[in-house]
Image: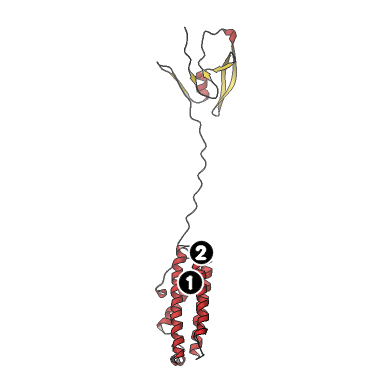
Amino acid sequence: MRDKLWSASIPLLVLLFVSGITWAQVHRQTRTLAINGQSGQAEVVEIKGRVYVDLEALAQISNGSLRFTAKGIVLALPTPSVNSPEPVPSPSPVDDSGLSRDFMRAGIEELATMREWASTLAYAIQNSYGVTDNWATNYREQAAHNLSLASTAASTEGDRNALQLLTNEFEAVRVWSDKLVHERKVMDTAKYAASPNALRDEPMSQKIVSCGRFLAAMLGSASFRDDSSCH
């Protein structure tokens, strides 16, 4: 009787041992067989320089399965496990509503320049000092320059929103400065010298002071907030 041969594609060629070969041609021995990281002892035979192993031993070592059907033999070997790389944690989302360090620094510098501009002008008007367009222009240009630096430093949504409030404050101080310079030119500033609170109590002055205080607190908190005094 002649048996059929079945083969499996594995690192070691595996065939069902075929009877009918003379015993002198067969060399039997026990070896360690390693398959997909699994190892065990199995009896192997060498026939004419080729090595064969029992299918049942192969299935047992590899944690596979072996079954016989009417149509043949089914040998199922487990798929080698592949170590998946550990997932790289995604970077934490940046809080775009916050204020960046560079913008806060530039914003505080701009705020200080506007405060010096307004306070110096108010002191000059209250004490009837001469105030000219050129004098006011120097402060205005410095404040405009610092506002431009703050605009360049704005990198987050919070920065850009805060920049709009800084711009509103700059425009308020500019309009207020132009108004006082004009009144000084037409000799209409005596009303401010008559009372120490006259200039401070003006609605425009109060709005500028309130917005300036709010901006200072907001820039110090590193978080954007809004306030009606800056609109």
Q: Is residue 2 above or below residue 94?
A: above
Q: Position of residue 7 (x, y in %)?
A: 49, 19
Question: Disc 1 designates what residue?
Answer: 217
- Quarter of the figure with residue 214: bottom left
Q: Could you tell me which residue is drawn at 47 percent across and 70 percent down?
A: 218
Q: Position of residue 31 (x, y in %)?
A: 59, 20
Question: In this figure, which colouring scheme has been used for the structure?
Answer: secondary structure
Instruction: Check if mark 1's residue and mark 2's residue have beta carbons within 8 Å.
Output: no
Image side of residue 227 versus residue 133, left or right: left
Q: Position of residue 202 (x, y in %)?
A: 41, 84
Query: What kind of element bears circle 2?
Result: loop
Q: Nearer the viewer, residue 35 or 144?
A: 144
Q: Could you tell me which residue is drawn at 50 percent across and 75 percent down?
A: 144
Q: Amino acid at mark 1?
A: Ala
Say if residue 199 shows up in the picture: no
User: For the C terminus, which image quadrant?
Assistant: bottom left
Q: Nearer the viewer, residue 165 or 56?
A: 165
Q: Could you tell me which residue is drawn at 44 percent across and 82 percent down?
A: 176
Q: Amino acid at mark 2?
A: Ser
Question: Disc 2 designates what residue?
Answer: 100
Query: What kind of element bears circle 1?
Result: helix
Badge 1 or badge 2: first in the primary sequence: 2
The residue most toward the front is 134
Q: Is residue 112 above or below residue 37?
A: below
Q: CA distance from mark 1 to mark 2?
A: 15 Å
